Image: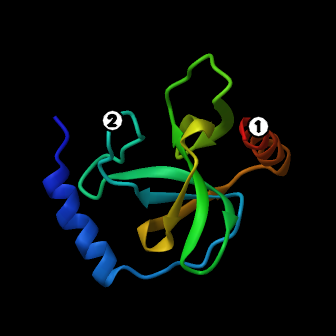
Amino acid sequence: MKDFDSWNIQKKTLHLTGENKFYHPREIWWCSLGVNVGFEQDGTGKVYERPILILRGFSKHVCLMVPLTTSQKKNPYHIPIGIVDGKEAFVITSQIRLIDTKRFINKIGVVDQKIFENIRKTIKDLL
């Protein structure tokens, strides 16, 4: 059972006290993604966090991103990006979304340029 009520409390705190972080495309950040509807990728732990890859920035407040997972699946929407925080990671290109940078917790890395270009091409082909 998803705990939407606890996430809603956390989300209100982020909205009121969170600070927008300085970021760049290709960076990987831990991010408070929250508890989401249905099969949308959720965060975990006390702050409902998950690593994300920044695809494009639009302002200091919002960016386009894709979440990361450690679940390896044989489908065109899971692209391997290497080791992130000691674990093999994959981006979930089908879960692309816009988020506010107040959700960012801390930067943990940068994706290789060739891998990033492959991810961008895959996402463009989805559209």
- Colouring chosen for the image of the structure: rainbow
Question: Which residue carries the number 2 mark?
Answer: 38
Against 24, residue 82 (above or below) is above
Q: How many angstroms separate mark 2 from mark 1 (CA)?
A: 24 Å
Percent x, y for residue 9?
17, 66
Report the amino acid beneath label 2: Gly
Identify the residue at horizontal 54%, vertical 42% (top origin).
Answer: 95
**In the rendering, which numbered label is found on residue 64?**
none
Identify the residue at horizontal 59%, vertical 55% (top origin).
Answer: 65
Identify the residue at horizontal 43%, vertical 74% (top origin).
Answer: 102
Pointer 1 local density, CA inside 10 Å: few below 14, some 14–19, many at least 20: some
The secondary element bearing badge 2 is classed as loop
Q: Is residue 96 left or right of residue 123?
A: left
Identify the residue at horizontal 77%, vertical 46% (top origin).
Answer: 120
Q: The N terminus lies in which quarter of the figure?
A: top left
- Considering depth in this image, is 112 or 4 the residue closer to the camera? 4
Question: Which residue carries the number 1 mark?
Answer: 122
The secondary element bearing badge 1 is classed as helix
Pointer 2 local density, CA inside 10 Å: few below 14, some 14–19, many at least 20: few
Against 81, residue 56 (above or below) is below
